[in-house]
């Protein structure tokens, strides 16, 4: 799936990016960063993919890093939204954890180009922007940790180390963006179901 397809998907809110020229540049940046990496991509590369001149990019984004920050902020906001929605739904801790993993993995698989940029280019951000994104990651971490803690307190989960298990669960889900291939034999939905089952086994969820 290309970054251009991401722009039409309801669960990746590129529609928030306006005007259209700014959106095209952002989509082009996602494609370039995912393909070549942030540091190997030039502003000329991004502008060329968007069908614009390099000068046009600076009308909408002061720097290449500003583009990366915008992509990263939108992606991390979405990640937090997905996890929070699963946490706040009704049901047992096991049901909530399964839904959190299922939806988080679906997003990372279905939008793997975007997710790779969002999750693996954080060190290219400025100190200020990186701190902002790290705070969003902490909030996502807290959501999953809260579900695990609820499961432990209810006796449904057997998790001696809640913080460590939280890190393991999130890392498992995020890594999907690195290897997922749309031409593979599993769909994003199928991978989401597989990982939800694996995580429930990991925490020894009781039926």
Image: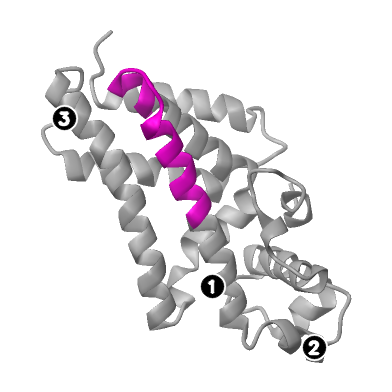
Residue under the point 39% across and 41% down: 172
Q: Residues within 10 Å of mark 2 (few under 14, many from 20)?
A: some
Name which residue lies at 49% across and 55% down: 77
Nearest the camera: 112 or 52? Answer: 52
| SS under mark 1 | helix
**Where does residue 2 sit, x and y in percent of width and height?**
75, 52
From mark 1 to mark 3, how far is it between C-alphas? Answer: 35 Å
User: Looking at the picture, does residue 3 appear above or below residue 30?
Assistant: above
Residue 32: quadrant of the picture: bottom right
Disc number placed over residue 54 in the picture, else none: 2
Other-residue count near label 3 (Cα within 10 Å), few / some / many at <14 / 14–19 / ≥20: some
Q: Is residue 175 visible?
A: no
Q: CA distance from mark 2 to mark 1?
A: 19 Å
10 Å neighbourhood of mark 1: few (<14), some, or many (≥20)? Answer: many
N-terminal-most mark, 2 or 1: 2
Magenta-drawn segment: 77-97
> What label sits on residue 69 in the rendered view?
1
Q: Position of residue 179 (x, y in %)?
A: 56, 46
Left or right position of 71 against 7: left
Quarter of the image for residue 53 reads bottom right
Residue 155, by quadrant, is top left
The image shows residue 16 at horizontal and vertical percentages of: 67, 60
Left or right: where 152 falls relative to 206? left
The quadrant the C terminus occupies is top left
Marks 1 and 3 close (CB-CB < 8 Å): no
Quick check: 113 above or below 143?
below
Of tags 2 and 1, the one toward the viewer is 1
Give the residue at mark 3: 159
Under tag 2, what secondary structure? Answer: helix
Residue occupying image coordinates x 37% and y 26%? 96
Instruction: Decide whether residue 82 is among the magenta residues.
Output: yes
First of labels 1, 3 by sequence position: 1
């Amino acid at each position: 799936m290309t970054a251009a397809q991401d722009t039409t998907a309801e669960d990746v809110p590129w529609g928030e990016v306006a005007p259209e020229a700014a959106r095209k540049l952002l989509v082009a940046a996602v494609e370039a960063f995912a393909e070549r990496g942030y540091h190997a991509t030039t502003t000329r590369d991004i502008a060329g993919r968007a069908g614009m001149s390099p000068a046009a990019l600076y009308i909408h984004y002061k720097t290449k890093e500003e583009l990366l920050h915008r992509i990263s902020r939108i992606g991390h906001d979405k990640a937090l939204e997905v996890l929070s929605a699963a946490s706040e739904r009704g049901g047992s801790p096991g049901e909530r954890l399964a839904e959190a993993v299922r939806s988080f993995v679906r997003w990372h698989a279905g939008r793997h180009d975007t997710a790779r940029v969002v999750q693996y280019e954080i060190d290219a951000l400025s100190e200020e922007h990186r701190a902002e994104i790290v705070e969003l990651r902490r909030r996502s971490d807290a959501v999953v940790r809260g579900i695990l803690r609820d499961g432990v307190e209810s006796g449904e989960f057997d998790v001696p180390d809640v913080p460590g298990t939280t890190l393991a669960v999130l890392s498992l889900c995020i890594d999907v963006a690195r290897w997922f291939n749309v031409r593979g034999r599993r769909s994003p939905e199928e991978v989401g179901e597989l990982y939800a089952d694996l995580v429930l086994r990991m925490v020894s969820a009781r039926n």
